[in-house]
């Protein structure tokens, strides 16, 4: 038996199946965009630990920062003793992501925890309880984050879910434009939002709206600019806290530090995690100081939040991103992916219904007969399986798992990126030929 197979057998034996296996890869070590599996083979990583490794696997300066910090101070709990790496990271995040006149930052361990705390803060700041969220949303697996999440496959049997969560349709232009141009579509969707405030929940009860401007797990669906700007206006008009979830889209993935920079708006609160720590468990809630300070002492926090080693990793990761101009690289990686997928779509427009992307958050959606309402999940699963056999790790997204998304490290060398894209193209063409044959 191969060692990789042995790993998977041991996994089945001791790890509960609820922790889903999205890919059969194994890993012993990794560098930049390459993983060495348990059989010593090189795998091309187009997933980056699900959007965590924008700066690549094990960047040297981050590894060194972790080592130096671990030797010096590993834990005090920030509630007990104040240490500088926490302060330095918060100051850096407040500089990168100013929210209004003065910005304050709370550190967390994960994306779900960032979302959970953003909601607690928004409720305390407004004295209201209702939260508006969207179809296709994914905000994590803690109880509140799961309640905000849309895809039922991620929450089946886990209820009852948190109350006072209201879900409205995400402005998915590709699926729902019904012949309207983007402006008319945006107008219709914003009108729907207004109606929600009369039909579902009174505005006086709404604490926050939470949105991903590019839905991650939802299939890299991009919010139209006009809609995001309209949402900002509605929130201003009615005193609703606008929370933008940047957990997957942040830190150079879209070619900017945040997705919201593409939209010319600023949220009241934003949530972060994933690529800010190169794999170390760290996240953040960034917000307007007056809103952040509304949370009573003791109502937010935790034993490990902003652990010194994780803070050091994050500070070094951000420095690496700045020094290597990773935002620019995000644009370049995105362009290469778009080109490859648009060429495929030209050949197979009936099957590749949509190719979309913001920076390096690029995806293509598989459908039947060019019909956006008929997801082709089977083809997507086959393509992923065939790429895995060729040592290329890719995962799907979307409610129906019919979207191929790319989340490779942005540091990936061109040659490796092209090789991986070539493998996807070849395997896709082979599948198409087998359908025709
Ligand atoms: C947009 C978004 N929010 C929140 C989360 C949850 O993050 P975590 O898995 O770190 O809890 C994710 C994870 O994929 C995400 O994509």
Image (spheres, rainbow, N blue to C red):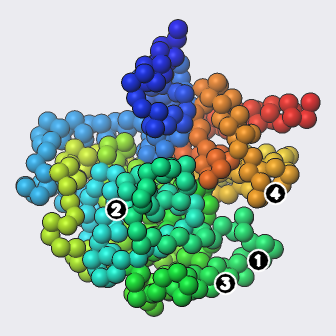
Residue 371: mark in rendering: 4
Q: Residue at x 52, y 81 (%)?
A: 200
Going by the image, does 304 lie left or right of 150? left
* Mark 3 beta carbon near ligand 1 (under 8 Å): no
What residue does disc 1 label?
A: 181
Dots 1, 3 in contact, CB < 8 A: no
Going by the image, does 402 lie left or right of 166? right
Q: Residue at x 27, y 66 (%)?
A: 105
* Chain-order first, disc 1 or disc 3: 1
Residue 116: mark in rendering: 2
State how far apart marks 1 and 3 are (Cα).
10 Å
State how far apart marks 1 and 4 are (Cα).
18 Å
Q: Residue at x 7, y 55 (%)?
A: 81
* Chain-order first, disc 3 or disc 4: 3
Q: Nearer the viewer, mark 3 or mark 4?
A: 4
Q: Nearer the viewer, mark 1 or mark 3?
A: 3
Find numbered disc 1 in the image and state the secondary structure of the residue it sits on.
loop
What residue does disc 3 label?
A: 187
């Amino acid at each position: 038996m191969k060692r990789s197979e042995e790993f998977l057998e041991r996994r089945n034996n001791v790890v509960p199946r609820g922790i889903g296996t999205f890919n059969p890869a194994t890993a012993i070590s990794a560098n930049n965009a390459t993983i060495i599996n348990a059989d010593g083979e090189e795998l091309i990583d187009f997933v980056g630990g699900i959007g965590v490794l924008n700066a690549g696997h094990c960047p040297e300066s981050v590894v060194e920062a972790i080592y130096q910090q671990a030797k010096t101070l590993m834990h005090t709990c920030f509630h007990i003793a104040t240490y500088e790496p926490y302060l330095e990271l918060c100051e850096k995040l407040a500089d990168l992501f100013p929210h209004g006149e003065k910005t304050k930052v709370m550190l967390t361990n994960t994306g779900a925890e960032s979302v959970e705390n953003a909601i607690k803060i928004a409720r305390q700041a407004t004295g209201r309880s209702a939260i508006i969220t969207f179809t296709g949303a994914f905000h994590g697996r803690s109880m509140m984050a799961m309640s905000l999440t849309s895809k039922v496959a991620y929450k089946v049997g886990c209820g009852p879910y948190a109350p006072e969560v209201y879900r409205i349709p995400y402005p998915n232009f590709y699926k729902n434009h019904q012949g309207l141009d983007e402006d008319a579509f945006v107008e219709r969707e914003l009108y729907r939002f207004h109606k929600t405030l009369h039909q579902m929940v009174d505005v006086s009860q709404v604490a926050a709206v939470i949105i991903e401007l590019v839905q991650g797990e939802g299939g890299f669906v991009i919010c139209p600019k006009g809609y995001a700007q309209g949402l900002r206006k509605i929130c201003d008009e009615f005193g609703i806290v606008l929370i933008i979830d940047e957990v997957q889209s942040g830190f150079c993935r879209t070619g900017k530090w945040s997705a919201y920079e593409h939209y010319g708006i600023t949220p009241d609160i934003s949530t972060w995690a994933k690529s800010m720590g190169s794999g170390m468990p760290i996240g953040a809630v960034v917000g307007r100081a007056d809103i952040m300070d509304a949370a009573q002492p003791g109502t937010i926090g935790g034993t490990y939040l902003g652990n010194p080693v994780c803070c050091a990793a994050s500070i070094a990761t951000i420095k690496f991103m700045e020094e290597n101009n990773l935002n620019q690289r995000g644009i370049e990686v995105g362009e290469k992916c778009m080109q490859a997928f648009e060429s495929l779509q030209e050949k197979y427009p009936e099957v590749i219904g949509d190719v979309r992307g913001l920076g390096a958050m690029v995806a293509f959606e598989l459908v039947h007969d060019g019909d956006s309402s008929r997801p082709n999940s089977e083809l997507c699963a086959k393509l992923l399986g065939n790429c895995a056999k060729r040592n290329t790790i890719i995962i799907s997204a979307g409610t129906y798992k019919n979207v191929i998304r790319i989340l490779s490290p942005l540091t990936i060398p061109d040659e490796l990126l092209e090789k991986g894209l070539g493998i996807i193209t070849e395997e896709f063409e082979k599948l198409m030929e087998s359908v025709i044959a």
